[in-house]
Amino acid sequence: MSGRQVRVFGGLALALLSAAALAAGGDLGQVEKQATNWTAITMFGAFVLATLWITKWAAARTRSAADFYTAGGGITGFQNGLAIAGDYMSAASFLGISAAVMMNGYDGLIYSIGFLVGWPVITFLMAEKLRNLGKFTFADVAAYRFKQTPIRAFAASGTLVVVAFYLIAQMVGAGQLIKLLFGLEYWIAVVIVGALMMIYVLFGGMTATTWVQIIKACLLLGGATFMAFVVMYNYGFSPEQLFAAAVKVKADSAIAAGKSIEEAGTIGQAIMGPGSFIKDPISAISFGMALMFGTAGLPHILMRFFTVPDAKEARKSVFWATTWIGYFYILTFIIGFGAIVLVSTNPQFLDAKGGLLGGGNMAAIHLANAVGGNIFLGFISAVAFATILAVVAGLTLSGASAVSHDLYATVFKQGKADSASELRVSRITTVALGIIAVVLGIAFEKQNIAFMVSLAFAIAASANFPVLFMSVLWKDCTTRGACWGGFLGLIVAVVLTVVSPSVWEATLGNPKGSALFPYTSPALFSMAAGFIGIWLFSILDNSARAKEDRAGYLAQSVRSETGIGAAGASGH
Amino acid sequence: MENDSVAKIVANPKYQHLVSTRSRYGWILTAIMMIVYYGYIALIAFDKESLAARLGEGVMTVGIPIGFGVIVFTIIITGIYVRRANSEFDQLTHEIIEESGK
């Protein structure tokens, strides 16, 4: 126990940083391959069969580009809320947050709250306007009154960059997770994920992608609820008793590590309050902004607002998404404490040095075994794999829409492409993205990619979100302002991430302390660059186009407020 | 949309009422959410002890109900907005659309 305890407190800050990327669906780090788990593989097989059957059903309904991109606008608010929550409750978020709670207690809660608080803001300021202005991609909203070619080119770049980083992180995470849970080779896992994801998107489009996400969200919420229920049942449904037991476990292991009784008491109680997660307020605020506003700029999340028939359902979907995500974070907190008392005290789950078998992120997986035996372990492992599959399918669809709808149909064909050829281009792009994702997933196997998801969030918050926000809400915004400001935000986010400790030191191997940018997340600065850029280049813009852009605001605002003329559900 | 129908809708007092009420309501709720979240973060950044203080005899601290409270508050404030927008604001929008003759 002692070795583990020292590492727990020594590596506390580091663990939370990597958990930062994890929760959003990132890197699981290098993991040991486990024995082949046939229960998990069988359960996963059942999930795959069910989803393939749904894809077949969805394929029969996917005829037009509208069906492919937005499921014909026929998803209800409740269903869409579950799907959005599913995009958010990634495998790594489930494993990463419960592991962070197991290790650091309260800090894990602070961290998960950051992911939730962006949702109300999106609801209050953006959701209905997005639905009223948009058709297939967020570029439809941003480009509503602007010159199409430059703004679409910007939006497609913003989308593809975010999707690329997110996708690599997911693919590498999938490979590591499956090596860990199923005992399969890394490359086999990556190829399976790539192939299945291509089948869902190619044949079933948004309908299949959404239903795969909904099923997975239900399985994950159900599984996590069961785990939290059993943990609470063991402590007579008294939080006080659960927390007291966890504090005692932490204190006992501190005593075993040679601390005095008094020190051990303090160490034990430390999991009940904030620790070192927030050390400098700038990093905390900057990271919080990346999470809060990045959510409102992630193309695969924004795309979901176009799958519901109207603004009313769009609002309902964010309400349900917020509810399920909030509920899920409460569950992961209980699961993390459950892991302290039921996993870290059980030698069955520990290696010779007292660490968790398979690595720190296995907390929830071992807890599944502890509360439900081998069958439930298999179930949770299969759900974790299904989760990655569902998230990559959504990402690929959103990348394919950017290429076929924004670049091909609008920029290349000047809006004259017919639905059939647009659909063909998006399918070709899906195959290309699938192959690229598999190749990059294998290429990045041994790389430290913890920064990639934080980078995706930072770019979404600094490039996509400011352009979307200003084009919808600011009358004087112009095409030039939006494009230049958006690219400025994108470049600042990428550059600051490269010279931040997580890339400059941890990935590029430069000496510690040599990073030029000291903070965890660039969002505070790169978002400011994006917004100021848009403002400055817009007010300096006196071109004829700028007059047209400004004159278009009134009609845009009427449509964004009332939905008159908005794309409805394409009837089935 | 035709320019004259845009002008007609913008001139409708109901439209002006809808836009100003909804946008004020949205910004006020946004401000409340920001105050709650960044207030919580500031409390952690500047006064960790207050959250780590015990609530009585046991191990329970002030921070646990506050943290859970932020989660529940986030859900509730979203619900409050959606409830008003889906009834009052949508009713108003519906009337504006009817009156615009579309």
Image (tube, rainbow, N blue to C red):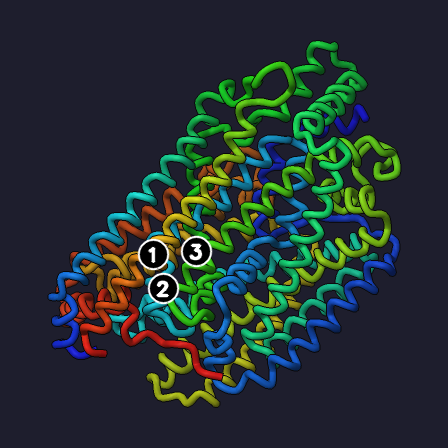
Mark 2 lies on residue = A130
Q: Would residue A571 be found to the left or right of residue A28 on screen?
A: left
Where disc 2 sits, the SS reads helix
Residue B100 versus residue B30 in the image, above or below? below
Q: Would residue A323 be found to the left or right of residue A152 on screen?
A: right
Picture disc at residue A515: none
Spot occupied by residue A172 in the image (x, y as percentages of width and height):
67, 57
Looking at numbered disc 1 in the image, what kind of residue is underneath it? Ala
Query: Looking at the image, which residue is at 17% across and 65% down?
Result: A550
Query: Looking at the image, which residue is at 23% across and 78% down?
Result: B102
Label 3 – label 2 distance at C-alpha:
16 Å
Residue B44 versus residue A194 in the image, above or below? above
Looking at numbered disc 2 in the image, what kind of residue is underneath it? Leu
Q: Residues within 10 Å of mark 3 (few under 14, many from 20)?
A: many
Residue B10 versus residue A324 in the image, above or below? below
Q: Residues within 10 Å of mark 1 (few under 14, many from 20)?
A: many
Mark 1 lies on residue = B85
Instruction: Report which quarter residue A355 is drawn in.
Output: top right
Residue A341 visible to the viewer: yes
Spot occupied by residue A411 in the image (x, y as percentages of width and height):
36, 79
Check the residue under mark 3 and report the chain it is in. A
Mark 3 lies on residue = A460
Query: Looking at the image, which residue is at 81% across and 51% down?
Result: A377
Q: Would residue B54 be found to the left or right of residue A498 on screen?
A: right
| Mark 3 and mark 2 residues within 8 Å of each other at the beta carbon | no
Spot occupied by residue A267 in the image (x, y as percentages of width and height):
67, 19
Query: Looking at the image, which residue is at 46% across and 35% down?
Result: A284
Most foreground residue, A278 or A304: A304
Quadrant of image for the N terminus of chain A: top right
Label 1 – label 3 distance at C-alpha:
27 Å
Q: Nearer the viewer, mark 1 or mark 2?
A: 1
